[in-house]
Amino acid sequence: MKKILSIAIALLMIAGVFACNTGKPADNPDQGNSGDTAKEITLWTYPIGNWGDEATVKTLTDAFTAETGIAVKVEYLTYADGDDKVNTALTGKAGPDLIMEGPERLVANWGANGYMVNIADMFDATDKSEINAAALSACFADDKTAYEYPLVMTAHCMGINLNAFKEAGADQYINTDTHTWTTEQFTNAVKALYAKYGDTVGAVFCNGQGGDQGTRALVNNLYGGTFTNAEHTAYTWDDAKNIQALKALYDLEGIAYDASIVGGDEIANFYNGIFKMAFCWNIAQQQNPNSAGTGAGKTANGDEIVFMAFPSQDGKAQLQGGIWGFGIVNNNDNARIEAAKKFIKFMADSEHTADAVRASNFFAARSAVEGKALDVWSSDPIMAEYTKLMPMLGDYYQVTKGWAAARTAWWNMLQKVGASDGSEAAISAAVAEYCTQANDGAK
């Protein structure tokens, strides 16, 4: 009798062990121990170039599935409601396995709020040497914590009407090979253009935040000012160098503070020949600035557009940029996390990376893959030339706390500067007021 009872108890204990080991949430059927790999994962992607195009992405995910046996379900987000959809999913513990976006969301928002997996272990010494330093830094919350693996990046810049520059004799102030110029050269070019055309040749647009990466980069670069501190804990645009830049722009005939337009309006005015330069420019505009059939890099009347770095005192610009890559949502499912890591390495650190980069229409965040040079755009003259700007990518400060409020404070500040009497005292007061607002929002 005792023997039968002992056997019964042992069987119950074994059954209990198996119940514990196989008990899975109903909505998480692929849960497994570390080292296991799920056979299906989900990716939510914002419209980053053709990563928002189903046919393009299917080609990439089909190749991944063929090599790994892991299926990928993709949901395509928009910037209009994507954040709401992601936030709802994350708080409801129903998030995807992967999200494709930038550090301001993956690192500074969802990562900082505990929703993302720390993937610092995915970066070995070779990766760190091959990935662009600015992109790498932006993906890490601290030395031991990373929430994004970068795939692509771009740099925002200026565009100039080369024909107009030549007609005004201002082309002597630009270097079309390096795409750089100094603050003094920029000032002289504006003076020459104004002398020729007698009207506004470039505008500090400030009706809203649209395209504000251009006005920030213009002001910061002119005399070496900064927008935030290096630690991304405070906004620093109230320094004397930025005040000097804002006053110089105010005083420069041919440059206007325009509170009636945003970046998109500025581009339209530039394209239509009203402005001779644009501060809101990037590779997307350079490749296709219009729909009038005049071709890439041309204005509406066929004038040649040349992209330029922002002017700085030494001619070495720090460009604002965009960085996009993949983050893994922490669904407490090791098997799905392992599968997601395989997906990231396939797209961002393998022989398939060039294809994944081309799909974005941007530039690779790394120069090589495991020691082999990464050649993506050498056959495309415009993209190859634009690559010269990539080493100029500056600090990715968009991860600073209170970012949304800071952007609003910035354009409000520009409006107040433009409406002032242009004195140093008035400009300093406006800068101090709105920079304080930004820092209050970052607390």
Image (cartoon, helix red, strand yellow):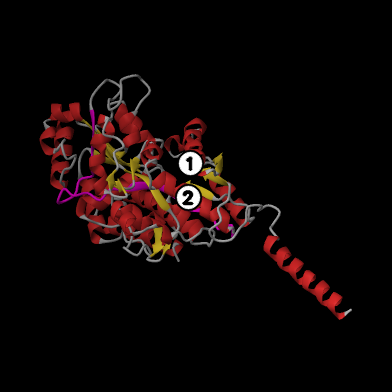
| Amino acid beneath label 1 | Glu
Say which residue label 1 marks. Answer: 67
318 falls in the magenta region: yes
* Quarter in which the C terminus is drawn: bottom left
Residue 169 placement (x, y as % from top left): 11, 31
**Which mark is drawn over residue 296?**
none
Q: Which residues are magenta?
A: 305-332
**Extreme residue toward the right, this view:** 1
Q: Relative to 4, does residue 281 appear above or below in the rendering?
A: above
Q: Callout 2 environment at 10 Å: few (<14), some (14 to 19), or many (20+)?
A: some
Left or right of residue 396: residue 386: left
**Extreme residue toward the bottom, this view:** 2
Q: Residue at x 61, y 51 (%)?
A: 89
Q: Residue at x 71, y 64 (%)?
A: 18
In this view, the residue in front, 405 or 67, is: 67
Asked whether residue 400 is in view, the answer is no
Q: CA–CA distance between discs 2 and 1?
A: 11 Å
In this view, the residue in front, 16 or 108, is: 16
252 falls in the magenta region: no
Q: Residue at x 26, y 52 (%)?
A: 220
Left or right of residue 170: residue 236: right
* Quarter in which the N terminus is drawn: bottom right
Q: Secondary structure at mark 2?
A: helix
Q: Callout 1 environment at 10 Å: few (<14), some (14 to 19), or many (20+)?
A: few
Residue 214 placement (x, y as % from top left): 32, 44
Q: Relative to 345, does residue 279 appear above or below in the rendering?
A: above
Say which residue label 2 marks. Answer: 342
| Amino acid beneath label 2 | Lys
Q: Which of the 4 quarters of the picture holds residue 403?
A: bottom left
Q: Residue at x 13, y 40 (%)?
A: 188
